[in-house]
Structure formats: structure tokens, C-alpha cells
Image: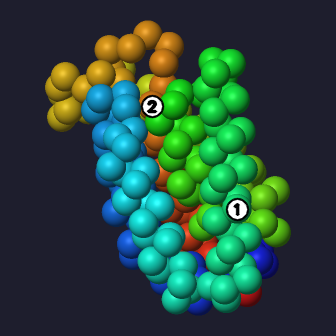
Amino acid sequence: MGLHVTAWSALWFLPFAAPVCVYVCWSDMRMMKIPNNAVLALTAVFVVVGLIALPLADYSWRLLQLGVVLLLGIVMNATGLVGAGDAKFAAAAAPFIHPGDFIFLMMLLAATLLGAFAAHRLAKYSPLRRMAPGWQSWETGSDFPMGLALGGTLALYLALGAVYGS
């Protein structure tokens, strides 16, 4: 498995981005919201750590990725395809992704989404639910806390990049 992301950049990003990803997963399950402070924190991680982790030319292009994904997310949110928090988180996560890893990332997102959905539904209808009473994601009908899959995907991507990156 050869990823285009360098192990160097993944190792720099991972310890700072992973806690934000965990917070996003937890927050979206608990409140069915991805808070703006998490999106801003993830963006700040890239802005600061990216100066160390990436060559300057790559850094600039990755910031452009944030803008492009944000615009796509706004359109997708306006058409009801995704939630606003999901769109903002995807935009904040975009600069962490090497453009050459896009297809791999989509496959990783699909696998993570399936696993997160199955785990969430199993917990929702099992005694595990009592460990987190009052979480809104238990109470919503068919809605799913997409932040669980999005945060998990970014954290997994960076972890895999740290091990298998170029």
C-alpha cells in the first residue's frame, strides 16, 4: 500500500489532528452537531503544523483544497445532501489529504462509513446505549452522525500515512 502522503507530514499532523477527530466523533454522536470550534481547531492545526510538515508549494495548494471543498460543501448543503457541520469539517480536513490519495481516501471513507454505521446501529439497539444516555444520535430516526465517519476517516488516513506513506 503506497500512499502519496509522506510519512513525515502524516506524523506531524496526526498527534494534533487526531484529538480533534475524536472530539468531532463524540460531539456528533452526542449532539448531532459538529461544533465550529472543532472545525476552526482543525484548520488551525493545518495552518500552523503545515508550515513544518509540507513544502511551501504543497502548503499553498492544500489551502486551495480547503476552499474548493468548502464551496462544494456549501452547494451540497444547500441542496440537502450533507449537513453544514459535515461540509465544514470536510473542508477543514481537505488540506491534510495528498491529492494523489483521493481515490484511496474515497475507498477509506466508504469502509469507515460502513463500519461506523454498523457500530452505531449495534450500540443504539444494545445495552451499550446505557453508557451514553441522552445522546441525540440514539433518538434520531434515520439520521446518522456523519462526523463519526468523517473524523474516523481523517484519523485513519493520517495513521496509515504515518506507517505506509512515501
Q: In this view, does 88 lie to the left or right of 106?
A: left
Tell which of 17 and 73 is nearer to you. 73
Left or right position of 70 against 154: right
* Amino acid at dot 1: Leu
Q: Is residue 55 above or below residue 61?
A: below
Residue 60's image quarter? bottom right
Give the position of the N terminus as an image quadrant.
Answer: bottom right
Image coords of residue 70 (percent x, y): 63, 45
Asked if residue 109 shows in the view, the reply is no
Q: What is the number of the mark on residue 64?
A: 1
Residue at 36 percent across and 51 percent down: it is 38
Q: Position of residue 4 (x, y in %)?
A: 76, 77
Q: Are marks 1 and 2 in contact (CB under 8 Å)?
A: no
Q: Is residue 137 above or below residue 9?
A: above
Q: Is residue 134 placed above or below 88 in the rendered structure?
A: above
Residue 145 is labelled as 2
State the residue at coordinates (54%, 54%).
92
Indicate the position of residue 43 as horizontal and vertical percent values.
Answer: 47, 61
Q: Is residue 122 left or right of residue 149?
A: left
The local secondary structure at tag 2 comes to loop
Mark 1 and mark 2: Cα distance apart in space: 27 Å
What secondary structure is marked by label 1?
Answer: helix
Q: Residue at x 68, y 28 (%)?
A: 76
